[in-house]
Amino acid sequence: MPASDHGAGPTVTGPSPASGALTARATANALNAAILAEGSAERAVKEKAYLKSSLKHHGTPVPVTRKLVRSLLRSRRDLNRERLVAIAEELWAIQVHEARAAAVMVLAARTELLLASDMRLLTRWLREARTWALVDEIAPRVAGPLLARYPELEATIDQWATDEDFWLRRAALLSYLEPLRRGEDVFERFAQLADRMLDEREFFVRKAIGWALRERGKRAPSEVHAWLRPRLARTSGVTLREAIKYLTPEQAAELTRLASSSKRK
C-alpha cells in the first residue's frame, strides 16, 4: 500500500543532511524513489499514452508528487540557489515524467532564490519538455515570477514569442498568466505578444491566448471584450471560446455573433 494511504502522508527518505552525503544527485534519486513508491503501473500506462510521452512514467498523481517535493524542501531549508538548481537539474536528467515535474516544482517553490541568468535553464527545459504538462508549469510558475523580479527578461520572452518551437511561443504567453489572473498591470504587454500570434495555426498557441484572456476576463471582462472586438476576423474559434467564458452574457453573445459574421465574409 502506498505510504499516503496510511494517513501520515508521503515523505522523502534519504541520506541525512547532517551526514554530508546529501549530494544533489542523491537527493534527486531519493525523491524519485519516493515518487515511484507512490505510483501505479496502470496509471503510468494511461498517462504516457495520454501525453504521447517518450519519457518513463511512474503513474504518481500530481498532488502526491507535490507533497513529496514540499516534504523535501521542508527538510532542506538550508538550500541556497546553487544547491536548489543542482537538485532540479538532477531531477530533470532522470528522464521520468514525474521527476521532471518535481524539478519544476522545486524551482517554483523557491523562485526567490533564482537569478535572471536561470532563464537560460528554463529555455532549455522548455525545448526538452515537449508537453503542455511541463510547459504549463515552467512558464507561469517559474518564468513568470522571474520576469516579475527582473523586467529585463522581457527580451527573453520576446525571443520565445518568435521561436520556431511552438512550445516556447506558448510559454511566452503563459509567463503572464498569474499576474493576469491577479489583475496586475500586464495586459498591454501580454496583448502585444498575443496580437502577433492571433494568426497562428498551432492549436497549443491558440489555446494559450484564449486561456490567458479567459483568466483576465474574470477580473476585467470589458478589457478583454474591447481587445477582442476589432480582432475577431483573426481570432480562431478555440481562442474565442476560451476568451469569452467570463465575459458578460451580452459581451459574449455580441462577440460570437460578430465573429460568425466576419468568418462568412
Image (cartoon, helix red, strand yellow):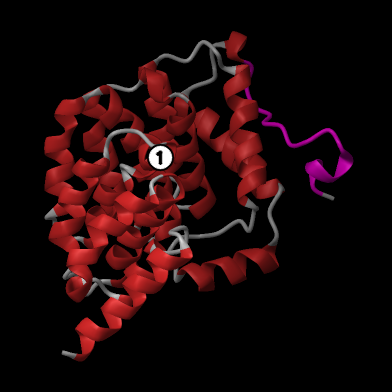
Depth check, front residue: 47 or 57: 47
Depth check, front residue: 152 or 101: 152
Q: Main secondary structure of the magenta part?
A: loop
Left or right, residue 4 beside residue 111: right
Point out residue 265 in the picture as x, y percentages from the top left corner: 15, 89
Image height of 7 relative to 152, above or below: below
Residue at the (45%, 60%) spot, across then down? 248
Label 1: few (<14), some (14–19) or many (≥20) C-alpha neighbours in 10 Å = some
Image height of 4 relative to 264, above or below: above
Q: Was residue 22 drawn as part of the magenta stretch in this picture?
A: no
Image height of 221 relative to 115, above or below: below
Left or right, residue 225 beside residue 38: left
- Residue 246 visible within the image: yes
Q: Was residue 10 drawn as part of the magenta stretch in this picture?
A: yes
Point out residue 156 in the picture as x, y percentages from the top left corner: 15, 39
Total marks drawn? 1
In which image quadrant can residue 124 be found? Answer: top left
Amino acid type of disc 1? Glu
- Residue 93 visible within the image: no
Image height of 237 relative to 242, above or below: below
Point out residue 259 in the picture as x, y percentages from the top left corner: 27, 78
Residue at the (69%, 68%) spot, across then down? 42
* Residue farthest toward the bottom in the current orientation of the protein: 264
Query: Circle 1 sits in a helix, a strand or a loop, which is it?
Result: helix
* Residue farthest toward the right in the current orientation of the protein: 6
Residue at the (65%, 27%) spot, across then down? 71
Q: Which residue carries the number 1 mark?
A: 178
Residue at the (66%, 65%) spot, across then down? 43
Magenta residues?
2-16
